[in-house]
Image: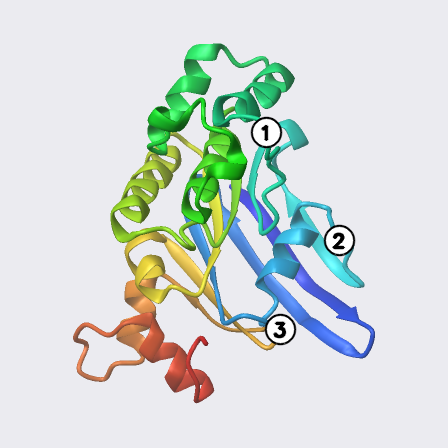
Amino acid sequence: MISVSMKNTKKSFGNNEVLKGVTFDTREGEIFGLLGPSGSGKTTIINILTKQLTSDSGECHVSAKSHEIGLLLEHDGLFDRLSCLDNLIVFEDIYGIPRTKTLEALQQVGLTYAKKTAVKKLSKGMRQRLVLARAVLHKPSVLFLDEPTAALDPMTARGIHKLIRELRDGGSTIFLTTHNMEEATHLCDRVVMLHKGIIIEEGAPKDICEKYNAMKTVMDLESVFVELTGGGLE
């Protein structure tokens, strides 16, 4: 079953055409990666799918209702003066989540020790983990993650990957953007590669790597992107 989709979607800001007819679909219960460098249109796509922006043309669809969607976006929207736990309690009340589930979410992202710490005292990586805890608090059926492991150390990132896989295994559809090709290769079931507002390749990471490697040996998605565009992700 299709969970999230776009069909010939276009979006411009003034004379800058950011999306040039983007088409893709995600399947229910998969980790779907949207890959590309900064400025390629990844965040614009998420903002359109989550109804923070409207497209100029084309079709967009998300199968989940608004209360069944989880978000981790560029702007975290945390309350700096509140503690980690109190930030989650705000949403606990909205979703009718029991306190045990709120504490479990903090544990899942490794922030139990900081539950009484004011958000303004957190590092960037800790803030990112708290936003992820908030995003998964209500066990969403569709979870949008914009650069979910940005600013996180490798050990914490591995823990986040484990949580994302557990959510997928529990039936959630995970839609994530990243320019970390290694992350996408090991985490995603399928990916699309976005370059200057156009999808240039899509499929399972392993299949894409093999397609562009005549020797059929291990090749990373970064190398594929360089071959397709003549440049890297920075």
Checking the image for residue 188, the label placed there is none
The answer, for residue 184, to whether it is visible in the render is yes
Q: How far separated are the C-alphas under marks 3 and 2?
A: 16 Å
Q: Residues within 10 Å of mark 2 (few under 14, many from 20)?
A: few
Residue at 37% from the left image edge and 40% from the top image edge: 164
Amino acid at pointer 2 = Leu
Residue at 46% from the left image edge and 19% from the top image edge: 102
Residue on which disc 3 sits: 197
Q: How far separated are the C-alphas under marks 1 and 2?
A: 19 Å
Checking the image for residue 68, the label placed there is 1
Q: Earlier in the sequence, mark 3 or mark 1?
A: 1
**Image coords of residue 96 (percent x, y):** 59, 13
Q: Residue 225, relative to residue 58: is it above or below?
A: below
Amino acid at pointer 3 = Gly
Q: Earlier in the sequence, mark 1 or mark 2?
A: 2
Q: Residues within 10 Å of mark 3 (few under 14, many from 20)?
A: many
The answer, for residue 142, to whether it is visible in the render is no
* Colouring: rainbow
Q: Residue 41, relative to residue 216: is it above or below?
A: above
